[in-house]
Image: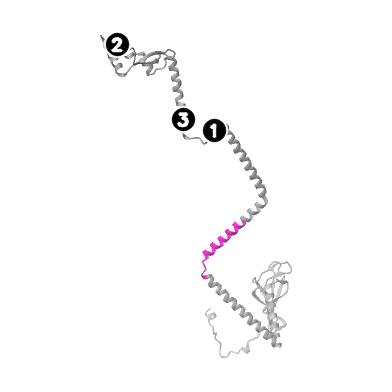
Amino acid sequence: MAERKVLNKYFPPDFDPAKLPKLKLDKHRQYVVRLMAPFNMRCTTCGEYIYKGKKFNARKETVDGETYLGLEIYRFYIRCPRCISEITFKTDPENTDYVAEKGATRNFQAIKRAEDEEERLKKEREEEELNNPMKALENRTKESKQEMDILEKLEELRDLNARHASVDHEMLLQQNMKYAKEIEARQEQEDEELVQSVFGRKRLEKRLSSESSDSEEEGSKGNLKRQHPENDQTVKATDVLIEESAKSSEPTEKKARSWEKSVGTLNKVSLGSLVKKKTTPNVAKGRSTSAEHVVVGSNSNSTATVPKAGGLSLVGNYSSGDSSDET
């Protein structure tokens, strides 16, 4: 078991490799190898799609009579995973690619086609420059001009980046918002002008009709105020007090009238007529000349003349009357 791990094995001194028997193997024999699909393909029998990178147990053989610059070309056999039909493809050392032979068709690859076209144009250009030196000079001038343009654009981009580095982004956002608001206001103004131009006449007619109706209503209200001045809103504050005093005086007048009906009017003159005064004939005669006659009455219908005496004489009369009654 230890011999399988060593690198150098023992050879006896009398070992002759020429004496070893040679195996007679077929030159075009096939080898079983494990590989992956080199490109996307589709089976022509069942239409199964085989993507690039799918693993297969393939058989490999050398193609007879086909070489490229001394390099051998190999062929591979695989089977479709769905219908088990045989698919073959071989190497293409000229283009460093593979070529599908039978059993499947290669899917279209735009990138591969573009790369091939670019390679072809490059080769044609190189051949043309080798044969025509003026064309080579012209191509060089074009390339130098393109390089100068690229450098100028790079400088512009650098300046722009340096300029943006010092810009306040919040200020830019505020300016954008302000500009958007101005645009909205302008659009609203244009819409309003359009509406005014379309519906302006109708609105004017409605406004005039409403104003005329309002003026008619105000005129009718003025006429009602002239007919009924108590409904006027412009009333003075003193008018309220006058109305209240008039209302409060009405029941007193009614009470006075009922009292007059039952008892009669009482005043200073009527009370004086009810008092009997005791007078002496001398005093009465002496004062009769200077006394004044006053018309009084116990009732409102009857009248009587009573002499109006002075204040001192009345006091004397009251005192004399009281003393006479007591005696």
Question: What secondary structure is the magenta-colored segment mainly?
Answer: helix
> Relative to residue 299, is residue 38 depicted above or below?
below
> Rounded to the nearest whole Å, what is the CA distance between mark 3 and mark 1?
17 Å
The residue shown at (69%, 72%) is 110
Location of residue 187 in the rendering, given as x and y in whole percent from the top left corner? 62, 57
Query: Which residue appears at 57% of the width and 76% of the height?
Result: 155
Tell me if residue 169 is in the magenta stretch.
Answer: yes
Q: Which residue is mark 3?
A: 242
In the rendered view, would you say 183 is above or below 135? above
| Nearer-N-terminus badge (2/3) | 3
Task: Provide residue 180's location: percent of width, then percent of height.
Answer: 58, 60
**Residue type highlighted by circle 3:** Ile
Give the residues in magenta.
Answer: 165-187
Does 256 lie within the magenta span?
no
Position of residue 159 relative to residue 66, above or below, is above
Q: Distance of mark 2 from mark 1, alpha carbons? A: 72 Å
Picture disc at residue 231: 1
Between marks 3 and 1 in the image, the one whose residue lies nearer the viewer: 3
The answer to which image quadrant residue 49 occupies is bottom right
